[in-house]
Structures are given as structure tokens and as C-alpha cells.
Image (spheres, grey):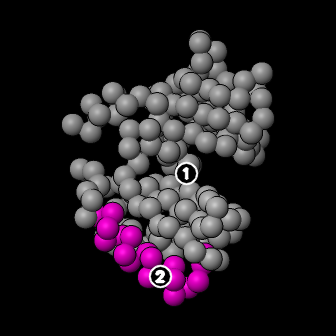
Amino acid sequence: MDFDVKEKIRQLAEPVVVSEGMELIHVECMKMHSRWIVRMFLDKEGGIALDDCAKISNQLGDIFDIREVINGPYTLEVSSPGFDRPISRDEDFLKFRNRKVDVKTAVKIEGIRNFHGMLLDYIEEGGRKLVLVELAGKIYRIPRQDVLKANLADAEQSLLKRN
């Protein structure tokens, strides 16, 4: 599924999710053998319940079908982001500063593609957005466009912050 379809899914889903008092955290689209898997991660103050996921899934399934956004059969999965919450939006990189993260890059940066360290900051410098990650006492400046995937890595700290 190309970026435009994923973005269209986000644009259609965001107002529905917000109207129900939730936040759309992340959208993933994967091609399986005979169908697409569309995963959406939601959050809200106090956490997401199964009923929240079912309500959003029913509403969005109808919208996606009517708008024919997804070409072919698909499965829509709606869930909470979990302890290893994806970090995919600019505001997420800012929100989760000083938290442990796992970052996978498209290219090696100083010989590394998988970073497990502390997210120090998210800045713009010279027209480029940079993710600053500290790993083993060294600060790496990772260009945002090179980030394939980023997730929170400190499940125990996440649990403590929710309580």
C-alpha cells in the first residue's frame, strides 16, 4: 500500500477517533497473501478498552468500504499502542523525550541501524528534522527521514507513568 493510501486512511480515521475522545497514534498497512492488514493504534486518558476498539473499528470499516480506500480485501485491526508504543508523529518524538526507545534506520548511521537508547530530543536544524538518541554515552543525530521504525522501549517506566 503506498504512502498516499496510508495517509488517506489517517485523514479519514483521525476525525472519527478524535470525536470519540481518543487519539490516533499510528497506522500500519501490510500486504499478506490474499489481503491487506490495516492496523490502527489508539490511546486516550486512562487507556483504551476493548469496547473503544470495537466502536472505532465498526465506524471506520464502514467509512473505508464506502470510500473504497483500500483496493481489495482487508482486515482492520484496532488496538491500544501497548507498552512498546510506536513513535511515528513529530509530536510523539517531542512527547517522549527522556524515555528509552528502539529506533531502526533505513541506512547505517556511524555503523549502526538499530539504536536502543534514550530519546534526548527532536529538533530541526538546517531544514532537517533530527532525532537525538543517546546510546552508550554517545549522542547520535538521526535524520527523521531515515527512521524506519521507532518504539518506546521502557515498558516498566510506561506502566509507572500510567498509574
The C terminus: image quadrant: top left
> Circle 2 sits in a helix, a strand or a loop, which is it?
helix
Where 80 falls versus 163 (above or below)?
below
The residue sitting at 76% across, 27% down in the picture is: 109
Q: For the residue carrying disc 1, how many other residues have a C-alpha within 10 Å: few (<14), some (14-19), or many (20+)?
A: few
The residue sitting at 55% across, 51% down in the picture is: 89
Q: Earlier in the sequence, mark 1 or mark 2?
A: 2
**Residue 149, quarter of the rendered image:** top right
Horizontal and vertical percent position of residue 153? 46, 30
| Residue found at the very far front of the displayed protein | 33
Q: In the image shown, does 7 or 59 lie closer to the viewer?
A: 59
Instruction: Name the amino acid, label 2.
Output: Ile
The residue sitting at 37% across, 31% down in the picture is: 155
Instruction: Name the amino acid, label 1.
Output: Arg
Q: In terms of secondary structure, what is the magenta stretch mainly?
A: helix
**Residue 35, quarter of the rendered image:** bottom right
Horizontal and vertical percent position of residue 11? 54, 71
Q: Which residues are magenta?
A: 52-70
For residue 127, side relative to residue 38 (left or right): right
Q: Is residue 7 visible?
A: no
| Residue 63 - label | 2
Q: For the residue carrying disc 2, how many other residues have a C-alpha within 10 Å: few (<14), some (14-19), or many (20+)?
A: some
Residue denoted by label 1: 89
Where 94 falls versus 55 (above or below)?
above
Give the mark toward the camera: 1 or 2.
Answer: 2
Q: Is residue 77 visible?
A: yes
For residue 50, side relative to residue 114 (left or right): left
The residue sitting at 50% across, 55% down in the picture is: 26
Q: In the image shown, does 4 or 65 lie closer to the viewer?
A: 65
**Distance between the Cα atoms at labels 1 and 2?**
23 Å
For residue 142, side relative to residue 68 (left or right): right
